[in-house]
Amino acid sequence: MDLTLIIVLVIALALFFDFTNGFHDTANAMATPIATGAMKPKVAVALAAILNLIGAFLSTEVAKTVSGGIIREGSGGVQITPELIFAGLVGAIVWNMVTWLFGLPSSSSHALFGGLIGAAIVGAGIGAVDFVVVLDKVILPALIAPVTAGVVAYSATKLAYWITRRYDGRPDGRGGFRYGQIFSSSLVALAHGTNDAQKTMGVITLTLIAAGLQTAGSGPELWVVISCALAIAIGTYSGGWRIIRTLGRGLTEVKPAQGFAAETSTAATILASSHLGFALSTTQVASGSVIGSGLGRRGSSVRWGTAGRIAIGWLLTLPSAAVVGAVAALIAGLGPVGILIDTVLGVGVVALIFWLSRRNQVHSANAVEPAPVQGQSEVAASGRAVKIKKVKPLKKERARKESA
């Protein structure tokens, strides 16, 4: 296949992956403020999209990890071809769409790395992957970051409730945290842009280096940064309501003070990792924070069944995407016909998943149950959920029967 054509295909597929990353990870920043009523759903996702766009311009350290770390550079250059990168992206997108359909907040980052690793092993051999970098920059952060964020969120939640203990027993005493959530969730969205948008920049840069159009070790070009920033912002604005439902209400009932604590710990963890070039999963960090905040609030409970489903998704993401990427790489090895088959199969799977999703639609109106209105107790709000049928007085009913 003509080199220019395959590069164009890879860039287009990479930007589509960036789009899926955006709507897959909207929940990381905006699930908790939507659940607590701090922001209206559509306003929240619009704000997240803008801040993701801005965040994408603030750092390129993670992009360099992807383009110059995971895949080895041999004497002849990077040991992966644009065709193999294409196959890896197919694996990442397919897994992203499957987990989105089931509302699982899995890691888009690990889906991407898994797809690339699987394709590279099939097409260039196991030596093409630098597993030391994978361990240091991907695996260890995946294990440490969610636990760290959870511990910080737990401590912050305990602290927040201790400081405001005079409001114990008052239904609206901590409503002011809703305003703090606007800031903290915005910080998470900004942090997400500094980490996740970089990964697609790294993939496109890796493609250009593999094709000999860019020198090895260099960072992303400005047009790559702009394109990826716009793609993830548009994806973020599209919502990702299924995963917002899982994180907003599926793990624990989130109160404003909890949400503020969870978002603050998530943002701090992501920003620190972006500075160090760790390509961590922002989804795992956000989930860990929500669980930590749920454990930190007295009387709260964590739905461990849902947490277990999410954990299984985490464990399966990298190897599953690697398997799909490897299969796509085998097919791509057939030449131009293989690339065409991969494209048709990938489009078919995405179309099927979108069709299946329409059978049980989740949108801004039903993603989470509305939080109680500020100034109204939760007991009073719960009365709206019960319809009490009016019973006619006994005397009137008896008189009506006698007259009949």
Image (cartoon, helix red, strand yellow):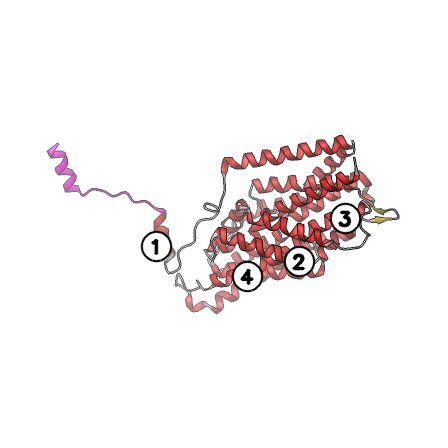
Labels 1 and 3: the sequence-earlier one: 3
- Write down the residue under mark 4: 184
Instruction: Give me the C-alpha separation between circle 1 and circle 3.
Output: 57 Å
- Write down the residue under mark 2: 57
Query: Residue, x 45% and y 46% (percent of image)?
Result: 365
Q: Are marks 1 and 3 in contact (CB under 8 Å)?
A: no
- Write down the residue under mark 1: 380
Amino acid residing under circle 3: Leu
Labels 1 and 4: the sequence-earlier one: 4
Instruction: Give me the C-alpha separation between circle 3 and circle 4.
Output: 34 Å
Amino acid residing under circle 1: Ala
Q: Taking 192 as reference, is 359 left or right? A: left
Query: Residue, x 77% and y 32% (percent of image)?
Result: 336
Inspect the magenta stretch and tell me whether residue 399 lies in it.
Answer: yes
Q: Residues within 10 Å of mark 2 (few under 14, many from 20)?
A: some
Amino acid residing under circle 4: Ser
Identity of the residue furthest to the left in this view: 403
- The residue lying toward the viewer, choosing from 234 and 150, is 234
Instruction: Give me the C-alpha separation between circle 1 and circle 2.
Output: 46 Å
* Magenta stretch in the rendered image: 385-404
Q: Are marks 1 and 4 in contact (CB under 8 Å)?
A: no
Q: Secondary structure at mark 3?
A: helix
Residue 262 location (% of width, % of height): 55, 59
Instruction: Give me the C-alpha separation between circle 1 and circle 4.
Output: 29 Å
Residue 402 location (% of width, % of height): 11, 34
Query: Residue, x 63% and y 55% (percent of image)?
Result: 193
Labels 4 and 2: the sequence-earlier one: 2
- Write down the residue under mark 3: 206
Labels 1 and 2: the sequence-earlier one: 2
